[in-house]
Amino acid sequence: MLRAERRQPIRTRIEHGEPSKGTARSGRAAVRPCPREVPTTRRLLAEIVGTAALVFVAVGGDAMARLAPGLMVGALIYAIGDVSGAHLNPVVTAAFTLKRLFPLGLVLPYWAAQLAGATLAALGVRVLFGGAVAAGISTPQVAPAVAVSLEAILTALLVLVILGTADRARIVGPNAALAVAATISLCGLIALPIDGASMNPARSISPALVAGRLEDVWIYVIGPFIGAVAAVGVATALHGLHDEDAKSEEAAQGSADGGRHA
């Protein structure tokens, strides 16, 4: 009877997620409750709204507001990261998928939502400012090969920061938004006059589509995807896959219980 009474608190602690001394010594973590699943429609709506806000600021601001896209992304990570992961960029979705942190079945819906949001934003700029939307088109001021290489490098840096903060979500927490915003802003300061510092195919495709100037779009699709793949390789070498880490998955997918940077 006495032994049963002594064991009861241990079972109670385990049931509430607190590891007992035995589990601590064995190195086995207590089972965490699974976060509530976010409906796919809410995820896609968040990506539409978020990408629309980002592209509206990036295209509408033109070269006079080099810091605007980064600041907008940082704010959106705080605002909608818990719903969709706040990708806002097709290459970020691809990178999370290659890192095994994001379900393959949601890749095409996310890409469609991001392109839809970006196109809505570009149309909004066209309605408000007319032909001025053309000023927001990503245009290289250097040879195409140089522009592709630059976009690949900038995107690799950005995605490496995004994946790194996701891999270390337990430590970094909400500060991930600041790291991502700072990276985008710094890349803009460096390369915006050279090639537009897009790092985001949706951001470049949408104003070019609305303005009917698609001749340079391929640069801003190929370059960022090359950079994203390279970043996945570097991040995996540095941090491992983390494909079974709940916090890393929440960072990539969002969660109704806290999400990307909770």
Image (tube, rainbow, N blue to C red):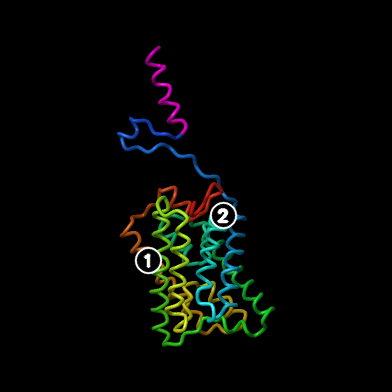
Q: Is residue 121 above or below residue 44?
A: below
Q: Secondary structure at mark 2?
A: helix
Residue type of the residue flagged with mark 1: Ala
Which residue, as the protein is rendered here, is positioned at the far right? 127
* Depth check, front residue: 132 or 229: 132
Give the quadrant of residue 59. bottom right
Task: Please name the residue that numbered disc 2 is placed on.
Answer: 83
Q: In the displayed structure, does residue 234 sit left or right of residue 189?
A: left
Q: Amino acid at mark 2?
A: Val
Q: Residue at x 52, y 53 (%)?
A: 254
Q: How many numbered marks are there?
A: 2
Q: Along the polypeptide, which appears first: circle 2 or circle 1?
A: 2
Q: Position of residue 79 (x, y in %)?
A: 57, 58
Q: Position of residue 230 (x, y in %)?
A: 36, 68
User: Which segment is the magenta one?
Assistant: 1-16
Query: Residue 213 lies in what quarter of the image?
Result: bottom right
Using the image, tell me which numbered label, if any, was put on residue 231: 1
Secondary structure at badge 1 equals: helix
Question: Do residues under tags 2 and 1 come within 8 Å of each other at their CB atoms?
Answer: no
Outermost residue, top side: 1
- Residue at x 50% of width, y 77% of height: 66
Dominant secondary structure, magenta: helix
